[in-house]
Image: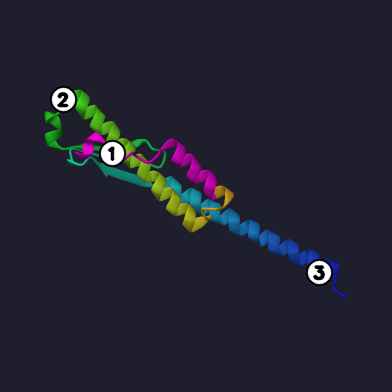
Amino acid sequence: MPDIADDAEEWVRSWSASVSEKAAAAQSLSDQVSRVTATASDPEQLVTVTVDGSGCVAGLHLDQRAGRLEMDRLAEVIVRTMRKAQSRLTEQVTSIAEQTVGIDSATGRAVVSSFEVRFPSEPTGTDDER
C-alpha cells in the first residue's frame, strides 16, 4: 500500500524544485533584458542610433553628410532610425525569452508583448528605402 505522506512529500519537493527553476529562468530573463541594446542605421548610413533596453537613446552618430540635410529631414531620419533600433529590441527580447522562460510561458508572453506594444516592427517600404 502506497504511503500517502511519502507521495505528498515527493510532490511538494517536485513542485518546489519546479518553482525554483522557473524563478531562476525569470531572473535570467530579467538580467539579460536589462543589458540588451540595439543599433540601427538609415539606408544611407547618415544616422546611427543605439538604444538601451528601455528604448532610450544611448548613442547617436551623425555622418558628416548628414549636415547637408535640411533640419526637418534630418530629424525625420533620426526618429525613423531610432524606431528601427527599438524594433530590434523586440527581436532580441523574443530570442532571450525563448532561451530562458520559453516563449509560450506566461512570463515570456507578457515580456515579449510589452516590447511589441512599445516598439512595434517598422513597416517596410518607407521613404528611407529609396
- Label 1: which residue? 59
Provide the residue span drawn in magenta.
108-130
Image quarter of residue 53 = top left
Task: Give the percent coordinates (x, y) of residue 46.
Answer: 18, 38
Nearer the camera: disc 3 or disc 2? 2
Classed neighbour count for the residue bearing mark 3: other residues with Cα under 10 Å, few (<14), some (14–19), many (≥20): few
Q: Secondary structure at mark 1?
A: strand
Q: Please state if 120 lies on the left or on the right of 11 as rendered.
A: left
Task: Give the percent coordinates (x, y) of residue 62.
Answer: 19, 36
| Front position in the image: 3 or 98 | 98
| Marks 3 and 2 close (CB-CB < 8 Å) | no
- Label 3: which residue? 6
Q: Quadrant of the N terminus?
A: bottom right
Amino acid type shown at disc 1: Gly
Task: Give the percent coordinates (x, y) of residue 39.
Answer: 30, 44
Q: Secondary structure at mark 2?
A: loop
Residue at (14% x, 28% y) in the render: 69
User: Is the stretch drawn in magenta largely helix, strand or loop?
Assistant: helix
Nearer the camera: disc 2 or disc 1? 2
Classed neighbour count for the residue bearing mark 2: other residues with Cα under 10 Å, few (<14), some (14–19), many (≥20): few
Amino acid type shown at disc 2: Glu
- Label 2: which residue? 70
Q: CA distance from mark 3 to mark 1?
A: 58 Å
Amino acid type shown at disc 3: Asp
Residue at (44% x, 47% y) in the render: 33
Residue at (32% x, 41% y) in the render: 85
Q: Secondary structure at mark 3?
A: helix
